[in-house]
Image (cartoon, rainbow, N blue to C red):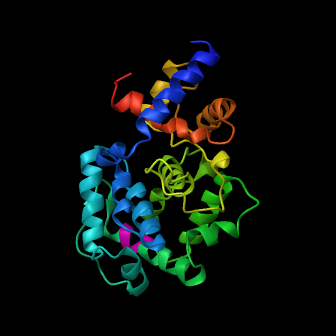
């Protein structure tokens, strides 16, 4: 496809998949259970953190996390005193990792009203720098070394797929009924696409990405292509690339 036809094709697919019916099979349904901003942020962050592997398994595990927290994640985080949590595991993520993240979030909410306020304090930096700042902040609380792998590190070449997905959920407009549009500290035009197996493979088939690895360098290359097609909202194409890969087996 030529660039004009490719943009038209992806615009059509993005509009098709950015629809409330998309929520029924997507991890974003977990934060959609809540209305308080802090509940949404915590549910979204924890769900995004375990978003790898089978989607049904992700949904099941994320729901178990919410139940473990009494379905009141913000209240749970703010009253958590570091006690041992009930046994929980999703692949390599376990109850010790969850405890660490709860303590980190508690520290954040003691200092900031919400995550948007935290990121506003880092306003003149790129999204990659914001991810690094968030990671650095969270790692201030006591934790096992193994838990650090659950917070992506762009400085070590990570595409930070799960955190970029979390950012997309929080930043992009809620107009279509999928994302939340809760944060103003980051603009949609600044977002990076959540680069995973599906989006990467479809992007390569469409000629948007030539790099074989799905690392930070590949992410920057793909972001650049998507920003040409829509400078104000490049990450809307996550719906197109992901939908083509998962639902259409493109």
In the depicted structure, whether residue 170 falls above or below residue 218:
below
* Outermost residue, front side: 175
Residue 97 left/right relative to 189: left
Residue 171 left/right relative to 18: right
Question: Which residue is drawn at the image coordinates 54% and 29% (left, top)?
Answer: 11
In the depicted structure, whether residue 213 falls above or below residue 20:
above
Q: If the image is split into quadrants, where does the C terminus sit? A: top left
Residue 50 left/right relative to 184: left
- Could you say where residue 194 lies in the image, as x and y percent from the top left? 51, 43
In the depicted structure, whether residue 245 falls above or below residue 140:
above
Question: Which residue is drawn at the image coordinates 41% and 36% (left, top)?
Answer: 17
Looking at the image, which is closer to me, 197 or 229? 229
Res. 210 visible in picture: no
In the depicted structure, whether residue 119 falls above or below residue 241:
below
* Outermost residue, right side: 124
Q: If the image is split into quadrants, where does the N terminus sit? A: top right
Question: Does 79 appear in magenta?
Answer: no
Looking at the image, which is closer to me, 164 or 147? 164
Looking at the image, which is closer to me, 32 or 193? 32
The image quarter in which residue 129 lies: bottom right
The image quarter in which residue 167 lies: bottom right
Question: Which residue is drawn at the image coordinates 55% and 41% (left, top)?
Answer: 193
- Could you say where residue 164 lies in the image, as x and y percent from the top left? 53, 50
- The residue range painted magenta reads 97-101
- Could you say where residue 224 lies in the image, as x and y percent from the top left? 67, 33
Question: Which residue is drawn at the image coordinates 30% and 68% (left, top)?
Answer: 66
């Amino acid at each position: 496809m030529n660039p004009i036809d490719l943009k038209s094709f992806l615009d059509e697919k993005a509009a098709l998949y950015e629809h409330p019916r998309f929520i029924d099979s997507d991890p974003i349904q977990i934060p959609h259970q809540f209305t308080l901003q802090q509940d949404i942020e915590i549910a979204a962050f924890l769900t995004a953190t375990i978003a790898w592997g089978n989607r049904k398994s992700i949904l099941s595990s994320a729901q178990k996390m919410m139940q473990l927290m009494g379905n009141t994640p913000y209240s749970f985080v703010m009253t958590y005193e570091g006690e041992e949590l009930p046994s929980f595991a999703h692949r390599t993520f376990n109850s010790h990792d969850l405890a660490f993240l709860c303590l980190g979030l508690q520290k954040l909410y003691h200092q900031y009203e919400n995550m948007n306020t935290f990121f506003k304090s880092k306003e003149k930096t790129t999204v990659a720098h914001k991810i690094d700042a968030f990671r650095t902040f969270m790692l201030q609380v006591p934790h096992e070394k193994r838990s650090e792998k659950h917070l992506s590190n762009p400085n070590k070449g990570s595409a930070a797929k799960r955190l970029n997905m979390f950012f997309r959920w929080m930043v992009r407009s809620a107009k279509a009924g999928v994302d939340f549009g809760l944060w103003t500290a980051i603009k949609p035009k600044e977002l990076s696409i959540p680069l995973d197996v599906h989006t990467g493979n479809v992007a390569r088939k469409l000629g948007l990405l030539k790099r074989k690895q799905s690392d930070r360098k590949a992410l920057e290359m793909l972001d650049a292509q998507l920003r040409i097609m829509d400078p104000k909202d490049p990450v809307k194409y996550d719906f197109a690339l992901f939908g083509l890969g998962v639902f259409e087996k493109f």
